[in-house]
Image (spheres, coloured by chain):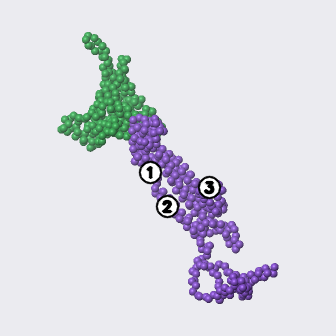
Chain colours: A purple, B green
Amino acid sequence: MSETATPTGSDAGDGDEPDRPTEERKIRQALTQIRREGWKVAIIYAVIDAALATLVVNLTATFLGGVPRLPARLPIPQVILRTLRETAGVTRAEPTVSSAAVVGVAVGLLVLAVEVAWRVRRPLVEQFEAANPTLQESLRTARDAVRQDQHSRMARRLYESVLADLKRASSVGLLDMRRVVVTVLLITVVSVATIQLAVVDISLAGLGDRPDANTPGGGTQSEYTGLQDGSSILGEPEDVPEGSEELDATIDTSGSGSGDGSDAESAAAYEDSGFSGPETVESQRAGFTEREQLEDAELIREYNLRIRQETNDE
Amino acid sequence: MSEPTTDIDRLQQRLSHVREEVGKRIVGQTEVLEGLLVCILADGNALLESNPGLGKTTMVRTVADVTDLDFSRVQNTPDLMPSDITGTEIIRESGGNREFVFEKGPIFANVVLADEINRATPKTQAALLEAMQEKQVTAAGETYELPRPFFVLATQNPIDQEGTYPLPEAQTDRFLLKLVLDYPSYEEERDIVNLYTGSGSGGAAPAVEKVLTREEIKQIQSLVREVPIADDVRDRAIRLVRATREAEMVEFGASPRASMGLVLTAKARAFMRGRNHVSWEDVEAMAPSVLRHRILLDFRAEREGLSTDDVIAELVDEV
């Protein structure tokens, strides 16, 4: 917010009302400026309150696990997607949005509209006068005198005096800074809480999670596709023991590309005894617990032999 | 005092100088003095009520002295004739010729003090009030303009009403203000005694300086009417006057002339205080003087011991 600067000299808008005395024209412009400041204040209050309402509704709905009677995610209309793509070049892989966010935005817009309407219902100049009591009577009188097109010596003198007072006045008084700061702090707190809730994925048990689709294993499959806990995907991390045992391995290279029948020997050896190493080596995922067992090497060998046998027979 | 930047500033400074000069002779009575000056600036007339010996003649004479205005005094008695006030035609001989000439009465002055107006007969009162209203006198078919500015200060005594002719309501309504002089405080009375009985004074009133000319008074009277007033302040003043007609304990309320008088005197007071607009404070301050002689209380107010000023104060709080 700024001081209510009154137009002076060259910026007095000489072109719009050339017949009016300068002071009267300046008073009219000052009144317009005061109304503009009033709108700014109304919008500032409405925007921060709307932001707070949006975040609170979103947080509450997310915490409760969703909005009753609405699916967890709502499709984004094609019009919006197209507009986003064409104007901002934004494309979404998944054209849905959380219903909690949609309801939050709707409530925020409602708060914005209602609060702006409520705050401008009282004439904005009167609000300014109330915030600047020393100016109240003189400004109100000047306002009425301008409306009645008074150009008398005393009226002009009043205009000069009011313009001088307005230069010292400020529209900051219209804004309750303590209230604004408190609201902004609340917005910050709710924002942090929203992010935290998304990270730890807390929801009030039984209220939000609806088993929309059963997994084959009998569990529930969540439709949530946002940020998830990394451990739930990769498993619990564990320390991998550093290999300290030395093993001797013999690699037979005799059948490699020589064309002297060694391939056949090698294949026969594989068919007879399978993979022969000095020790049984089990595969292990680096850094994570093995989640599924590899099939037995003997069983694999058995299948391979059968397949090969059938191929040869054909 | 800073150098006046405009004519209006200069005139407003002159007015405050007038008060200082009058203060050399009149101790206290600031509200009455302000009322007198307001009455002059609003081009009106005042009815002054006080007990004898409170300095009303001195005050009016002093105001005339510092404002360069002619002053005359009429002591009203039951045998005073209208022509004694307005003037009359007399036969004058010059060079063997006789001719009728109009001999102007004491009303041909800028400031006229009509002492104890309620002692004059209704006929004389009517002549005075007509001149006051019309600002002219008609005698033997000729009309004579009264000098401008013209200001009548009529006094009446609240005690000793025997053999008096109280002014009818229709005539009191013609006075813009009714000012009431009260006894001074102890300190003020001590200062008055010191001022007029000290060795330096010789019993004479202290000298005062003329600080405002007739032309300047006319200019101020014109400027006072130009003082802007906010619509809501004006409307509230009108509501106040109208409330006197509807108030429970008021038998007879104030006329629209009171509404005009209230707004005009509020403008004069604002100007005198150096403001460029009328404040509600001005209306509040002038309301008792404008309304107290224009309303009649009924028996309920009398039974409860309420004065007109009490009722007006209640109405001011209500509107």
Q: Is residue A218 left or right of residue B225?
A: right
Circle number at residue A185: 2
Residue B42 appears in the figure: no
Q: Nearer the viewer, mark 1 or mark 3?
A: 3
Residue B165 located left or right of residue B208: right
Quadrant location of the N terminus of chain B?
top left
Residue furthest top in the image: B96
Q: Is residue B195 above or below residue A262?
A: above
| Residue position for label 3 | A86
Q: Quadrant of residue B29?
A: top left
Q: Residue A215's x, y, as percent? A: 69, 71
Question: Which numbered circle lies on residue A2?
Answer: 1
Query: Which sits in the foreground, B190 or A53?
Result: A53
Cα–Cα span, label 2 and label 3:
36 Å
Q: Which residue is more in the foreground, B253 or A75?
A: A75
Chain letter, disc 3 residue:
A
Under circle 2, the secondary element is: helix
Q: How far is disc 1 from disc 2 in space, using C-alphas?
A: 23 Å
Q: Residue at horizontal 63%, vertical 81%?
A: A284
